[in-house]
Image: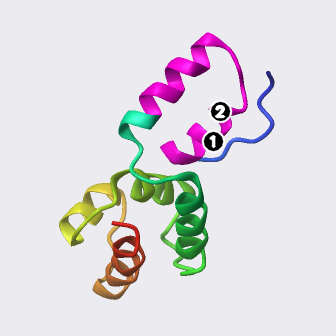
């Protein structure tokens, strides 16, 4: 298997990819992801799209993946994801509005 694209993915998105591969190692990965992923694949795709459509310059792919994995509940949780930059209240609230739809 070759690396085609390097893109940060949430656990739900990785689980979708792992399901397509049938070997013992990927079954272990699927078991782990099933245990810890908070979103279903369809929800993950919708959430990623909504977060990307916010058009926030500070919101990068790795942030989106972590938001999808952790589903932060408040600004304190958001700030734990954005350790390298700070968001203003408006940006934080926009992200939290999207996340609340999936909690």
Q: Decide if residue 84 is on the left or right side of residue 34.
A: left
SS for callout 1:
helix
Pointers 2 and 1 in contact (C-beta within 8 Å): yes
Q: Which residue lies furthest to the top in this view?
A: 24
The residue lying at 56 percent from left, 65 percent from top is 48
Majority secondary structure in the magenta region: helix
- For residue 23, what is the image quadrant? top right
Q: Is residue 25 part of the magenta span, yes or no? A: yes
Q: Is residue 26 part of the magenta span, yes or no? A: yes
Q: Residues within 10 Å of mark 1 (few under 14, many from 20)?
A: some
Q: Name the residue under label 1.
A: 16
Q: Residue 38 in the image: state x and y as whole percent.
A: 39, 50
Residue 91: which disc?
Answer: none
Q: Give the range drawn in magenta.
A: 9-33
Q: Decide if residue 42 is on the left or right side of residue 93.
A: right
Please tell me whether residue 40 is drawn above or below residue 33 in the rendered image.
below
Please tell me whether residue 92 is drawn above or below residue 4 in the rendered image.
below
**Quick one: 20 or 85, which is closer to the camera?**
20
Residue 19: which disc?
Answer: 2
Look at the image and tell me in which quarter the N terminus lies: top right
The residue lying at 57 percent from left, 52 percent from top is 41
The residue lying at 52 percent from left, 67 percent from top is 47
Tell me if residue 9 can be seen. Answer: no
């Amino acid at each position: 298997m070759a690396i085609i694209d390097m893109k940060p993915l949430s656990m739900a998105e990785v689980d979708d990819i792992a399901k397509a591969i049938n070997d013992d190692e990927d079954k272990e990965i699927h078991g782990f992801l099933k245990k810890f992923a908070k979103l279903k694949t369809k929800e993950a795709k919708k959430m990623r799209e909504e977060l990307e459509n916010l058009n926030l310059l500070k919101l990068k792919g790795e942030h989106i993946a972590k938001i999808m994995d952790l589903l932060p509940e408040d600004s304190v949780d958001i700030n734990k994801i954005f350790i390298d930059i700070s968001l203003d209240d408006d940006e934080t609230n926009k992200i939290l509005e999207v996340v609340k739809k999936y909690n």
